[in-house]
Image (tube, rainbow, N blue to C red):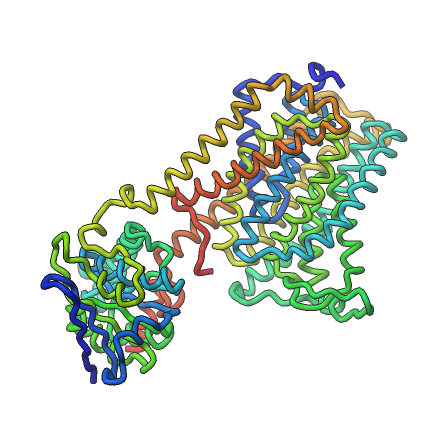
Amino acid sequence: MLAFLGIRTDGANAPQAVPVHPDPSRERRSDLFARRFHRVLVLLDLTARGEAVLRYATGIAVKDRSAMMAVHVMDGHPLFESDGPCGHFLPEERLFFTARATTRKLDLFLARNNASWAESTVLYGKTNEALATLISRWKPDLVVVDAKAMRHRAIAAGLASVPRSTRVLALERAERSRNAVAGVENHGLRGGTRLDVGVGASARPAAQDPARRKQVARTVLLGIGTGVLYWLMFANERAVLDLSAKGHWYFILPLAIALVFSFVHGVFTAEFWDVLGVKANRKH
Amino acid sequence: MDATISFIQLDPFSIAYLFVVGFVGGMVSGFIGSGGAFVLTPAMMSLGVPGIVAVASNMCHKFPKALVGAIKRAKFGHVDVKLGLIMGASAEVGVLVGAHIQQAIKLAFGDAGSNLYVSAAFVIVLATVGGYVLRDALRIHRSGSHHEEEKAGRLARFVQSIHIPGTMVYFESIKARVSFLVTIPLGFATGMLAATIAVGGFIGVPSMIYVLGAPSMMASATELVIAFLMGLGGTVKFAWDGYVDIRLAMIILAGSLFGIQLGAIGTTYVKPYMIKLVMGVIMITVLVSRALVIPVYLSELDLIAPLGDVTVRLLNNASFGIMVLALVLGAGIVLRALAAGMRESRLGHSPVAGEGPRAALRLLDDKA
């Protein structure tokens, strides 16, 4: 049986975080946020509210340097078992393809919210069992979920199976207004890092995202730096060749050029692929 | 040395050509630890660069490239710095000895003798090591045990059991104490091969895998440390004599740093046997390439009947073409593995079943 412990935050429109625990009487507000979480599981849909929940969970995961998994539970379920073709696909096949497309959407959703480093999973089919299996196997120590989603049959069933040591944090609805920012006040309770989890802010396109913009700017600067280095070398081509052809202690010149170029250009190429989305597999 | 004679004029075509060759070579190097460089010397020579300048410039682009690759792979936790430094030191000695042998052969038998020696070294080493690596990769592929942790072979277990007091060193990649005396001949052979065919990794990586028992992922990354040390030593030696054309080296470096990052990222998406597979495929293809030109050198040394001009040209071109094919093949496998790995990671990562949506569905069906 799930019990709820409500935490009121300031302001009428401010969001509320509702930690859920089998035995709430033991749970103190400060304890909840003083704890360091290693594995954060966030249940979300692909809407602005989902973004708010994701931002909130990301804030915690980044602060605690914890692993995060974003889970989207699909509602669709084949209503009948079929042993023959129906249109182009069997219902299960259709569900599979929909799930695959949703996985793509979820990954884009994560990327848009600067959380592409998180693992992502779409649950479909018998979702209540799948969620329970996921929780028992992945063993999150914090589950972040939209309070409304708690009423979802599969999610409620799945959350009923969380072990005692796992905290469940249900975020109440945040109204779409400049001042109503999901979770900000709760972060204040955790010792004060003000994290950007605003509903309005989270809908910004990736290009306007400060972290992303900073990375792109850094890459462009490094690219320009590399270009300048090459331009300098070719502008002084004759002098460089003459000096390096002299040999002996002039060997320092090609060596120094190689080291400086490799440093600037090396960082640039790493950032270059990163900006393009070609990143190492952190799940490996 | 007169710069106007030794260093060629660069035009946009040759810059683009070197950039692309550098990119593809870098990608292969980032993936298997080495192997991208062997085509660069002939590529530069085909532009009219004198042989020794081509070798020197190749060497000069190699050490910063290996440095960047090693740093990148170290971030993924693949590099065993201690093993790399110890083997790198003996590899330096191997490079010096190898270079002296080269010079002695050149003095005694001329260019054709030297080329024959290089080609014969290619064929013998690549046939032995390449065949073994490829067979091992195919065995793992056929057995279907791709996810299994690589286990040390019989030879590696024997080497790890040798205990020579006062010389035992714990290597993180091997997860065992091994006498550093065992690594000396391996490093030496790596250096010798690097001085002979420009790719020491064809001995370095397999020896770390099969003789010392290091996982292929760590062996290929640790090879970058050895390549850095050898490249640095070689560059100082050639630059001291004024042979380095820094422009050529930096153009190749420009391409290869893009490639080496991509190759290093690629290793995080593939199963370890893929590294062996790519290495084996490249080695065998290069072997065919070098075997083709052996008759040319034999005829130049009058050991067989002289070949016609057309035949010689045909064999030389076919050899170079196959060498380029080896590199393109390797790069193709790396890119394909990277694209497939990224797609799988993006779409199919399902911790419920661990294998992707289809497997997740299966699991749910099973449960039902």
Horizontal side, residue B73 vs residue B114: left or right: left
User: Can you give x and y, in whole percent of width and height, for residue B312 in the image?
Assistant: 72, 25
Residue in the picture at 63% in, 62% down: B173
Name the quadrant of the N terminus of chain A: bottom left
Q: Is residue B333 above or below residue B146?
A: above
Q: Is residue A129 above or below residue A186?
A: below
Q: Is residue B333 visible?
A: no
User: Can you give x and y, in whole percent of width and height, for residue A170 in the image?
Assistant: 21, 70
Horizontal side, residue B14 vs residue A93: left or right: right
Foreground of the two, B309 or A161: A161
Q: Quadrant of residue A98?
A: bottom left
Q: Is residue A284 visible?
A: yes
Residue at the top extreme? B4
User: Can you give x and y, in whole percent of width and height, for residue A237 in the image?
Assistant: 60, 19
Horizontal side, residue B342 vs residue B366: left or right: right
Q: Is residue A22 above or below residue B71?
A: below
Residue in the picture at 24% in, 66% down: A186
User: Can you give x and y, in whole percent of width and height, for residue A23 in the image?
Assistant: 25, 85
Foreground of the two, A253 or B177: A253
The number of numbered discs placed on residues in the rendered structure image is 0
Horizontal side, residue A117 vs residue B22: left or right: left
Q: Is residue B259 above or below residue A52?
A: above
Q: Quadrant of residue B29?
A: top right
Residue in the picture at 42% in, 38% down: A219
